[in-house]
Structures are given as C-alpha cells and as structure tokens.
Amino acid sequence: MQVPAPLEYERATSVDHAIGLLERLGDSARLVAGGHSLLPMMKLRLATPEYLIDINDLHAQLGYIKVEQTQIRIGAMTRHRELLESEALADTFPIFRDAERVIADPVVRNRGTLGGSLCQADPSEDLSAVCTTLGASCVIRNSGGERVVTMEEFHRGPYETAVGDAEMLVEIRVPIRGNGSSAYEKVERRAGDWAIVSAGAAVWLDGGVISDARVGLAAVGPNTTGLPAVSEALRGREPSEEVYQLAGDLAARHCSPATDTRGSADYKRHLAMELTRRALRRSVARLNGRV
C-alpha cells in the first residue's frame, strides 16, 4: 500500500454545489461518500484525482427510501445499513435485504452508499446485480436537468458508467408490480467478500403461472449481467424444479466468466446455474408464504 497522491479537498453543501464543482474542475475531480472503493484505489495509485469532493453532507437530500404506488425511489446517498433495516423495502423487494446481509461488514455498511456501489461499476458488485434483476432505472443529474437510464445503459463496462464528468447519480427507481417476490444468492471466499458468483431472481405469478421472471448475475462477465433468455423461457410456465433447472442451464450458457484467483470459468458457470436455481426457488417460496 502507498499513500494517495497530493490532492485538493472540498465539501459540497448541496447537489447543485457538487455539480457546479464537477463542472468547474472537470475530469480531474471525483466524488466521495463512503470511499471504501475509491480510497484503496487512491492508495494504490490506481486512481489519482486532483480534487476530491466530499458529498456526505448531502445525505439529508439524497438519503431516502420513498414507497409510491408504482415504484420505490431510493436516494443515491442511502447507506447500506438503511437499505438493510428498511422494512418497507424488505416487504416489497426482499432481495435487497438478502444482498445487504452479505455485503462487507457493519463498518462498511454504516458509511457506504447505494450510489457509490453502482458508480464503482465493479462486475462483482452485489447491488448492481440486485438493481439489474429488478429492472431499476438510474436518475442522473447535471446543471441542465435530469435524465433517466436503465441499468443496462448505466453500466458501460468494468468501472465505467453513463455518468459524465459534470454529472451525478441522484436516485434509483425500482418499479413495483403485483404478486411478485425476489431473492439473492451468493458464494464468496469469506464472509463479506466480493462474490465468486452471485445471482438475483425476481418472479411474478398470475394464477399459479409465471407471468414474468428476471435473473441478474454478478462476477461472470465485464458487467453485471441480465438474462433475457431466462425471462423468455419461464413466462407461462408453472414453477417447478424442472423450470428452475432450465433457468439455471440458460444462466450458465449465457454468462462469460473468466478463470482467476477466485475460481475457474467452469466452476463459475456451475455456480451461475446452481445459484440461479436457488434464487428462483426461494423467490417462489416467498410468494407462497413458505419463507
């Protein structure tokens, strides 16, 4: 480990102030909230911003979970701990609580934010997989207004997002649909570590038949991965072990893991298959009141 390169520091007092600083300072500036991803990269000189803009004082503006009739809106400064402890969020999307229970440790969860996790764009990041599974949208603000992008549009590559140099992620919107539930499964080397592979699933039923299903994977490609093929294959079928296996086989076939220190590509494909089965099974069990 090294020490970070010399830099200037300023504390933003509002969203508009932060965006104004980003406009003035350009791509030499970075935002910091929890800092659990950025600061280690700075110590290793993998990131060398000239200016650091602290946005922790913006929690009052951007730290919220608002349940509406058709969607849940979550501020980008909402802490992991707040996501974990929200009963309203867990009642509607239990996948969030599943994921938060296996993210890092209490110290990180007390300071880290949803927006910081998504903007880090790590292919192994848990909440990116959760938001991909749920079909969430990201609200990006600049001095001219706001724009809304899907998760597929938001993540452009490893550690690269749709947020521009003078822009800021301010909110995540998750659509609410009736008679659905969700779950998250993860295999890691040790508690709180990055995923070897993880899988999120969301299922909606209509008359005992799957009206829609979504699966999102992490750590099996350059981005968190949504699987439209699984959705297409499961619609109109009754939940069963045969259907879960079909979805697992499709997940293994449509992911692109690489062999690394966490495991071989074949092992990761096997995990993608098995964790997809488990997540779908648990989602349906929750819908039927068995979990």
Image (cartoon, rainbow, N blue to C red):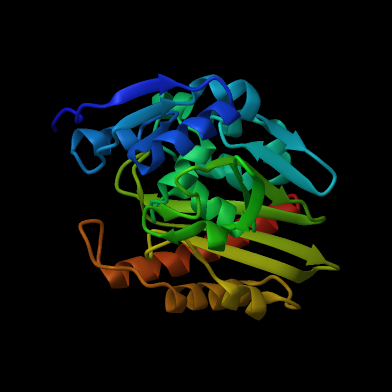
Query: Looking at this rendering, what residue extends furthest in the front direction?
Result: 24
Is 64 rendered above or below residue 235?
above
Coordinates of residue 19 in the picture (x, y in percent): 53, 34
Could you say which quadrant of the image residue 102 lies in? top left
Q: Is residue 100 left or right of residue 7?
A: right
Asked if residue 290 can be seen in this view, the reply is no
Residue drawn at x 49%, y 26% as measured from the top left: 55
Is 176 rendered above or below residue 63?
below
Coordinates of residue 212 in the picture (x, y in percent): 72, 69
Q: Is residue 121 left or right of residue 277?
A: left
Is 14 rendered above or below residue 67?
above
Count of marks placed on residues: 0
Coordinates of residue 41 in the picture (x, y in percent): 26, 39
Residue drawn at x 46%, y 69% as measured from the top left: 273
Question: If the image is split into quadrants, where does the N terminus sit?
Answer: top left
Asked if residue 174 can be seen in this view, the reply is yes
Front residue of 19/226: it is 19
Coordinates of residue 274 in the picture (x, y in percent): 46, 66
Residue drawn at x 65%, y 38% as measured from the top left: 74
Residue drawn at x 66%, y 30% as measured from the top left: 64
Could you say which quadrant of the image residue 252 lies in? bottom left
Query: Looking at this rendering, what residue extends furthest in the left direction?
Result: 2
Could you say which quadrant of the image residue 237 lies in? bottom right
Is 11 rendered above or below residue 29?
above
Front residue of 94/286: it is 94
Q: Is residue 289 left or right of residue 46?
A: right
Front residue of 238/147: it is 147
